[in-house]
Image: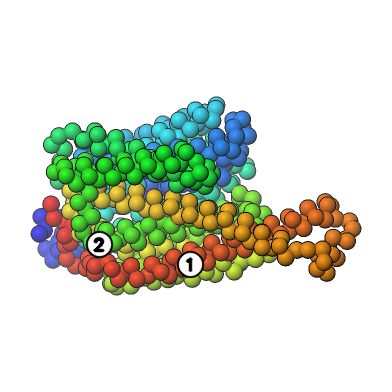
Amino acid sequence: MLTEAPPGAVRTASGTGATPVMTLRLFLVASTVMVGMIMAIIDASIVNVALDTMAGNLGASIDEIGWVATGYLLSNVVIMPLNGYLTAVLGRRNFYAACVAIFTVASFLCGTATSVWQLVAYRVLQGIGGGALLPTAQAIMFESFPPERRGQSMALFGLAAMVGPALGPTLGGYIVQNYSWPLIFFINIPLGILGFFMTLAFIEDPAYIKKPERSADWIAMTAMIVGIASLQYVLERGQHDDWFNSPAILALSAAAVAGIGYFIYRELRDPHAFVDLRVFRYRSFSVGNLVGVVTGFGLFGLTLIIPLFLQISLGFDAWQTGLALLPGALATAVGMPIAGHLVNRVDGRYLIAFGLGLSGIAAWWMGSFTQYAGYWDIFWPRALQGFAMGYIFVPLSTIMLTPIPRSALTHATGLSTLIRQLGGSFGIAILTTLLVWREKYVFSNLTAQVTPSRYPVHAFLLQTGLPIDPLHELALMLQGDATLISFNFLFRLSALVFFASVPLAWALPRVAVMGRPSVGLAE
């Protein structure tokens, strides 16, 4: 049933328009949440290109500096599912403003850190603020726009969500090469101050968000925190610690299963659950999250694998790597508005299937790279992949969230963001593990075929004037070939995952969003 128009939009008598004042209001609300989102998303990826520099300046080992990224992600995933509960307790405006403030203060502290563990502690604090910004912003954007314009709202949201991870390494590479690493944190401060005061001025507390009738189930909350944090740690550090050959990974895997299982059991039996898992009753949300896992796999997994390929196989530095990733971000910026326009005119399932297919083609194309690939060889498949992401994210977000009641929307966005993040972590864990395994396998096969009795090998070993020992030079060449073949294998495997996921689009229900109020307008 229709109860009221979304905040920031006023229906005309015909039910299809909005007043100019309200259009300005939508712009101010969108601008406010975009500031917070862009700040958080770019910062999540900008740090990765500066880790080596930080390690040198802080006297840290590679393992120690890795916790700068891992600590941020751990606190990120823990806070995401609490998004709905904390919004209800504190109010939307206060909660979002508090997240922006925490993120900004933590950014300043990160820039002043004098030891690696001090920096890790500040990054954990920063992750608490940043983890809630994205799902809260998505909820605000979705419900502030009228139903027929929700595709546009998700396009605006997607610009930050999808473009940010590609812009981060470019900006980070430039700063690290031309300035000092603390600047990657200090640049957040003016944005954070602006976002904080804009939040207080333009974000409102909707009347339908009610304070919880009782305090949270602290036992279930503890189980959730332990379970999700353990799972994220296993995915982040599993390859490094040799997976289940490590007692720590085994113990944390058990903790993840037990913690998450007990949390789900408690919450499903609680009529006043602090995380509303009942949103999974909606088929659009449940199936949409399966597609979201694939999207996370592609977005985060390939976003990791491509820079590794560029730097290891092609010898790109941080700045060149950022420039090579930039076409994907620019293509996403082009594709998002087009998808936002089409989502009200074309069945969203066709758009999602189209986006998954294009992503598969782009990933398969990347699987043909050679060691002589240059910028323009990388440009076109990256641009195609970036363009395709808009056709997945915009209709998928619209279909997933349209049936969700407003009172549960912040729970839904928190859970979907968490699932997409975990999907990305699964993708990264799987791809990095397969990269190591495949590289060893291919190198072993290549070296088995290299014997002095073979004429090309014999002729190479007889060469003089090589800068290093011929056997060592030959081993380096074979290792380079094995690495290249392994990267191509991962690109092609990712392509097959995208292609195999196309049928999932047809498991989604058809959701009409143009010219009528949706179920999501109900209280």
Query: Which image quarter: residue 91?
Result: top left
Rendered location of residue 124, percent (x, y): 42, 34
Q: Would you name the residue on which mark 2 appears?
A: 284
Per the rendering, the mark at residue 206 is none
Residue at the image point whose x is 84% and y is 64% from the top: 458
Instruction: Decide: is 322 above or below 266.
Output: below
Name which residue type carries label 1. Ala
Few, some or many residues within 10 Å of mark 2 (<14, 14–19, 20+): many
Instruction: Decide: is 371 above or below 100.
Output: below
Name which residue type carries label 2. Ser
Observer able to see residue 35? no
- The answer to whether the residues at label 1 and label 2 have Cβ atoms under 8 Å apart is no
Q: How many marks?
A: 2
Label 2: element kind: helix
21, 191: nearer the viewer: 191
Q: Would you name the residue on which mark 1 appears?
A: 495
271, 166: nearer the viewer: 271
Please indicate whether residue 119 sits to the left or right of residue 84 in the image. right
Rendered location of residue 431, percent (x, y): 51, 56
Observer able to see residue 256? yes
Residue at the image point whose x is 19% and y is 67% from the top: 515
